[in-house]
Image (cartoon, rainbow, N blue to C red):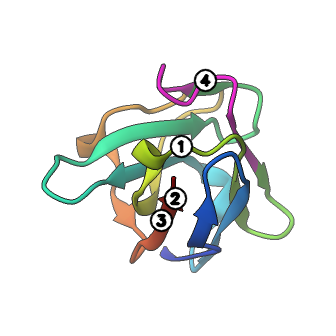
């Protein structure tokens, strides 16, 4: 499966952005999806994950209550709605796909088989 992330940009602190990740190739609904991010000089970290049918979601503590992950299997797209953005949210954001059974969220980067190219988010304070 090929993943194409988009929607990044420059936003002021307190603002919002919505990232999108469009998938092509194999059956999108067969994959749990996740978002990760990597800030300059830091390791890639988990942000949010959603199960195949969107029945379950999971968030990193740092974004809980501010970010929302969702998916539209008819459109082969996963989204990350980011509200109340902070300067520490500045990073390159990556979407990823993990083949798994229904109802499972995947939080470990090593379990994701496919990765998008990343979209850059910059939050100015």
Q: Residue at x 65, y 74 (%)?
A: 7
**In the structure shown, which secondary structural element does the residue marked by tag 2 occupy?**
strand
Mark closest to the chain's N terminus, 1 or 2: 1
CA neighbours of label 4 inside 10 A, class few (<14), some (14 to 19), many (20+): few
Is disc 3 in contact with disc 2, using a CB cutoff of under 8 Å?
yes
Asked whether residue 85 is drawn in magenta, I would say no
Bounds of the magenta segment: 59-70
Mark closest to the chain's N terminus, 2 or 4: 4
Horizontal side of residue 87 vs 71, given as left or right:
left
Q: Position of residue 84 (x, y in %)?
A: 69, 40
What distance separates the C-alpha of mark 3 from that of mark 1? 9 Å
Q: Quadrant of residue 108?
A: top left
What distance separates the C-alpha of mark 1 from that of mark 2? 6 Å
Mark 2 lies on residue: 123
Residue nearest the observer in this picture, 101 or 20: 20
- Disc on res. 86: 1
- Disc on res. 51: none
Mark 4 lies on residue: 64
């Amino acid at each position: 499966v090929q993943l194409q992330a988009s929607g990044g940009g420059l936003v002021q602190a307190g603002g919002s952005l919505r990232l999108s990740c469009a998938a092509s190739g194999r059956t999108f609904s067969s994959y749990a999806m996740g978002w990760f991010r990597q800030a300059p000089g830091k390791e890639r970290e988990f942000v949010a994950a959603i199960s195949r049918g969107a029945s379950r979601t999971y968030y990193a503590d740092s974004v809980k209550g501010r970010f929302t992950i969702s998916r539209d299997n008819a459109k082969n797209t996963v989204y990350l709605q980011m509200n109340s953005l902070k300067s520490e949210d500045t990073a390159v954001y990556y979407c990823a796909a993990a083949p798994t059974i229904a109802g499972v969220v995947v939080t470990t980067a090593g379990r994701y088989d496919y990765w998008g190219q990343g979209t850059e988010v910059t939050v100015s304070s």
